[in-house]
Amino acid sequence: AVTGKAERNFTSDLIVWSATFTSESTDLQDAYSELKGKQQAVASYLKSKSIPSEAIAYSSVSISRENESSYDESSGRTFYRFKGYSLTQTVTITSRNIEAIEAVSRQISELINNGIEIESGNPRYYYTKLNDLKIEMLKEASEDARNRASVIAEGSKSSLGGLTKSNMGVFQIVGQNSDEDYSWGGSFNTSSKEKTASITVNSTYNIK
């Protein structure tokens, strides 16, 4: 019974980046109008950066009531006062043009100069040919398992027989050259553009 392993470095080919903007007002319609104005400013900015409209998606508007509390010592009660509405919307860009979106994620703070407060998230990186990569690595891990079994059989003055059982082990994706921990359940890194994939195969052979 042996464990074969395959490892492969690769570069992500898809980036997903999101940013969030908010408006606040005691009047719901005013808050919504302000949010729409910010959305239009964001759309104009992205257009100026040559980001195609089909790569851009806006979330539905999230509405929450904001309250502030005060404690009355004489009565021992806490009172709440309506402060206003807070509306939030997120813009998400999905693209294969990784360099362009990385630049936008760094430069989006330019909107602050126009009075648009926007919170930029960290880009997430993916690989669209992951299934093909996984199949190739399964083959390599299976070959590695057989090579290991052959070495053990040869060292024991025996010969390797047929395969009786083989199971795929854990498939992991971590950041390349990182100290990221491997997980028994498998890890899937999205924060690094350069990644390392690994897979194991557990195989059992007869000995002749």
Image (cartoon, rainbow, N blue to C red):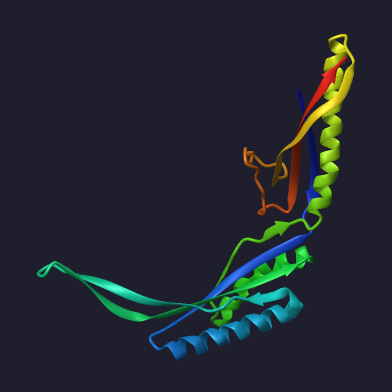
User: Would residue 128 be found to the left or right of residue 34 on screen?
Assistant: right
- Residue placed at 33% from the left, 80% from the top? 83
From what the image shows, is residue 53 above or below residue 152? below
Rendering quarter of residue 141:
top right
- Residue 187 is at least partly visible in this image: yes
Task: Provide residue 155's location: percent of width, then percent of height.
Answer: 85, 11
- Report the quarter where the N terminus lies: top right
User: Is 160 located above or below residue 123 in the figure?
Assistant: above
Up-down relation of residue 190 to residue 113 (above or below): above
Residue 189 rendering spot, x and y as whole percentages: 67, 50
Instruction: Name the quadrant containing residue 115.
Output: bottom right
Split into 4 quadrants, where in the image is the C terminus? top right
Q: Residue at x 53, y 84 (%)?
A: 35
**Residue sitting at 72 percent across and 81 percent down?**
47
Q: Tell how many labels.
A: 0
Dividing the picture into quadrants, the one containing residue 197 is: top right
Residue reaching furthest to the front: 164
Left or right: 16 in relation to 139: left
